[in-house]
Amino acid sequence: MSTPEKKETLAERVKRLSRGLRGTLQESLKDEHTGSLRSDDQLLLKFHGMYQQDDRDRREERALKKLERLYSFMIRLRIPGGMIGPVHWESLHNVAGENSTGTIKITTRQTVQLHGILKSKVKPTIKAFDQVFLDSIAACGDVNRNVTCTANPSSSPIHKEVFSYAGEISRSLLPKTRAYYEIWLDEEQVLEKEEPQDPLYKDVYLPRKFKIAIAIPPYNDVDVFTNDIGLIAIIEEGELKGFNVSIGGGLGTTHGNPDTYPRVGTVMGFVSKKDVLKVVYEIVTVQRDFGNREDRKLSRLKYTVDRVGMDFYKKEVEKRTGITFSPAKEYKFTTRTDEFGWSQDKAGNWHYTVFVENGRVLDENGYLLKTALLEVSKTRRATFRFTCNQNLILSDIFTKDKDLIESILVKYGVQRKTSEASPIRKNSMACVALNTCSLALAEGQRYLPTLIDKIEVLLDKHSLKSEPITIRMTGCPNGCARPYISEIGLVGTALGKYNLHLGADWEGGRLNKKYKEDLDEAAILGELDGLFSQFAKDRKQNESFGDFTNRIGILK
Ligand code: SRM
Ligand code: SF4
């Protein structure tokens, strides 16, 4: 009996026929009759770090006027480990002002996005970034995405060494096609026949997006267990020995689809630093070869590992690399939060972590954060490091320059904002959601700040004002602000409605659970009021809110 032929999905077909991610992007871009791209090209565009979007606030008005949607593009940069120099920042500031909405959005994966770029401005934007050696290659799409790493250099005397792996891993997993250079930077076109097949991605790329993070214990600011591959740096006697390797983390779910679920990664074992690149590469090839290509909802590595089994996955990686995993080494995470304000690393350099609410860098309501950061960049005395908590570290500042940077932060009120924000606000994150995200069911970053104003009043009422509780909101169940691993998770179900999740731990090792569904603001505040009251009365000494809600038996 012959086996039934597998049906190729649209996404798989588009990738296979894309001629190295070229598709008809050149032609689509030239078409001046529409602000959009051909639909197949919209899929391919993601591999170049961009999304076609439209202004959802203006859909109705445009439809009434019988106009096409107000299309624009989002560009996400590839910045492994999240560090750029002051010249890059100045360029980013200028490009944002000239070509996009002006807001620089720091993402939950340590990079930045610009929104609202019109079709005619996309190429000039990429070219402007290229002038300062920034690119958006593989920032989205079914490939390895931005590799993240514990952000603050004061986290470890060997931060620099560990951090270098983010760049190395990112480079080793980049697609080999020259399409990006041809389409966006006018490099002469390579004849298709002359371009050798990509040894890693072949012509099918990965079944789905792929994410890698590196954490330096005790800091888990990258939320290492929510990644397809999580690398935990093992440092003994001040020396980097290698990494514990976790696989199968991922958070995206779909409302009403019980086959989808968030999952924290499982540690496979330890590999030495000399072997880690090879091991990472082959973990990716196993997912390439065994991942589900028929149902994109079930195609992330987390589903592959649950389907084929951890033992099989591990053996396959060992077979392909010729390297045997050693038992995992001991480590301990104690925090995921950013350490705000000044810190000093072992070499004596200074780092100032700026609180950036939901990662939005703009001048708004008299708070000139964007202007302040431009002024810092113009001194050329600080680097810029993005954190996975959507904040920014002004970094690598010599002692002699510290006062200068501080004077700018004081002048623009950045230092005051950072020191005065409440602990819950400093531990909050929201995804972009409306008005640009096409998948949003509810608000994210535009709403969370005002909800926190009200939650702060409740915390004050129960004398919990100084309690650092992680709270994260997303406009849909895809989980872009990692709400399933925060102590309070709010996941959008419809405009103004959220599922309330509770019970994750402080360190990022345990997922939360859905507590109540479809709550509006009044209901969310009502639930939290009751829970805070109980917490204030019945918590054990030093017990976190997440551990408390997990302990008292309210979560099924
Ligand atoms: Fe995300 C899709 C924004 C981090 C899980 N994410 C999207 C898109 C591109 C919507 C789309 O497909 O059309 C969003 C663009 C919104 C906009 O207007 O800009 C979007 N995701 C974001 C960012 C910008 C949120 C933020 O406010 O910071 C983050 C960009 C990170 C980066 O720089 O690369 C972002 N997304 C995440 C994370 C968190 C993480 O990686 O640490 C997750 C959960 C972890 C995971 O991957 O499992 C995440 N995004 C998703 C998913 C669900 C994937 C899944 O496995 O089901 C989607 C939908 C999809 O892929 O189909 C998605
Ligand atoms: Fe969009 Fe949903 Fe991601 Fe928020 S969580 S940015 S609404 S895809």
Image (cartoon, rainbow, N blue to C red):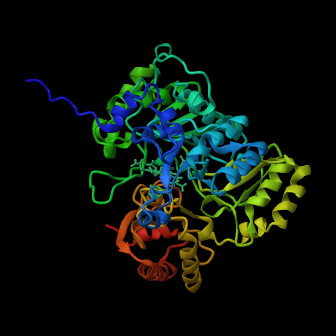
Q: Quadrant of residue 44?
A: top left
Residue at the outermost bottom position:
461
Of 89 and 33, the residue lying toward us: 33
Whether residue 492 appears in this view of the structure is: yes
Residue at 43% across / 59% down in the picture? 484
Residue at the outermost left position:
1
Q: Quadrant of residue 158?
A: top right
The answer to whether 72 is drawn above or below residue 461 in the figure is above
The answer to whether 290 is drawn above or below residue 518 in the figure is above
What is the tally of numbered marks visible in this picture?
A: 0
Q: Quadrant of residue 355?
A: bottom right
Which quadrant does the N terminus fall into?
top left
Residue at the outermost right position:
400
Of 164 and 209, the residue lying toward us: 209
The location of residue 213, given as percent across then percent down, is 54, 42
The location of residue 347, given as percent across then percent down, is 81, 42
The location of residue 438, given as percent across then percent down, is 44, 56
Residue at 39% across / 58% down in the picture? 477
Residue at 31% across / 37% down in the picture? 292
Which quadrant does the C terminus fall into?
bottom left
Residue at 72% across / 59% down in the picture? 354
Whether residue 154 appears in this view of the structure is: no
The location of residue 374, given as percent across then percent down, is 79, 54
Of 139 and 192, the residue lying toward us: 192
Asked whether, in this view, residue 137 is left or right of residue 381, the answer is left
